[in-house]
Structures are given as C-alpha cells and as structure tokens.
Image: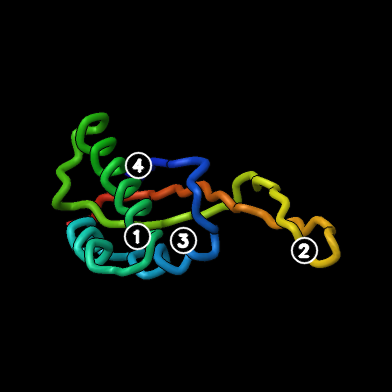
Amino acid sequence: MEVWATAKYLRIGPHKARLVGRSIVGQDVEGALATLAFLPNRGAHFIAKVVKSAVANAENNYGLPPGNLYVSRISVDDGPRLKRLRAKSRGRPGWYKKRMAHITVVVDERES
C-alpha cells in the first residue's frame, strides 16, 4: 500500500532538491535516512523530514511496520517564486527569483 507525505513552500531550489531525491529512490527507509544524514547538500535535511513523515503516516494511519517500507517515488515540483530587486549598473533594477519547492515522498511496503 502506497503512503505519501508532502512538504510545501520549502525555501530551496527544486533542481537542487531533485539531485538529492534521485539518490534515495528504491532504497529501504533506514538506508535512505542513513544516506541523507551524511549528504552535505542542504536539500537532504528537507527530504529526510518528509521521509520521516511518510513513515509515521504509514505506521500510525495504516499500521504498516516501518522495517518493510522503501522509498518508491520522490517528486520535487516548483513552488511559487519570490521576485526581488537588486541594484544593477546605471541605477537600473535587476530582478532575481528566490525559488521554492514542493516535495512529495511515496513509501510502499515490500512484498515478502
């Protein structure tokens, strides 16, 4: 049974979070959390929180044992962008965007 958790409006660029997310798809939950704990990327912290939330959802809402769960899918989507100004040459405004991400993690139970 697939169980998911999501975190929205995270202040990290989606491309940076996708790089981390791809590295743990298919791993069991304990191995994925161990991998995320030692990754130097900033996105590892956000994805680890969502994985823990998905495991808690599976355990508390559906009674699934956490030892049989694995990360089946991770989706990192674009969120809204904060548009900001910074001064450029000749006193003109330079626009830049602060990106946000929505992270969804799906865990599933392994068949014995």
Eye-nearest disc, 4 or 2: 2
Q: Assign a secondary structure to mark 3.
A: helix
Mark 4 or mark 2, earlier in chain: 4
Amino acid type, callout 4: Val
Eye-nearest disc, 1 or 4: 1
Q: Residue at x 65, y 45 (%)?
A: 82
Which label sits on residue 76? none
Q: With respect to residue 28, does 61 lie above or below?
A: above
Query: Could you give the CA–CA distance between mark 3 and mark 4, rounded to whole angstroms?
Result: 21 Å
Mark 3 or mark 4, earlier in chain: 4
Residue count near mark 3 (Cα–Cα under 10 Å), binned few <14, some 14–19, many ≥20? many
Counting from the top left corner in percent of width and height, residue 62 is at 25, 32
Eye-nearest disc, 2 or 1: 2
Marks 2 & 1, CB-CB < 8 Å contact: no
Q: Residue at x 50, y 54 (%)?
A: 12
Mark 2 or mark 1, earlier in chain: 1
Q: Which residue is mark 3?
A: 17
Task: Work out whether residue 90 or residue 43 is closer to the camera in this orientation and state it.
Answer: 90
Which label sits on residue 3? 4
Counting from the top left corner in percent of width and height, residue 34 is at 19, 63
Which label sits on residue 44? 1
Query: Could you give the CA–CA distance between mark 3 and mark 1, rounded to whole angstroms?
Result: 8 Å
Counting from the top left corner in percent of width and height, residue 87 is at 74, 58
Mark 2 or mark 3, earlier in chain: 3
Mark 1 or mark 4, earlier in chain: 4
Quadrant where the C terminus sits is bottom left
Task: Work out whether residue 110 or residue 87 is closer to the camera in this orientation and state it.
Answer: 87
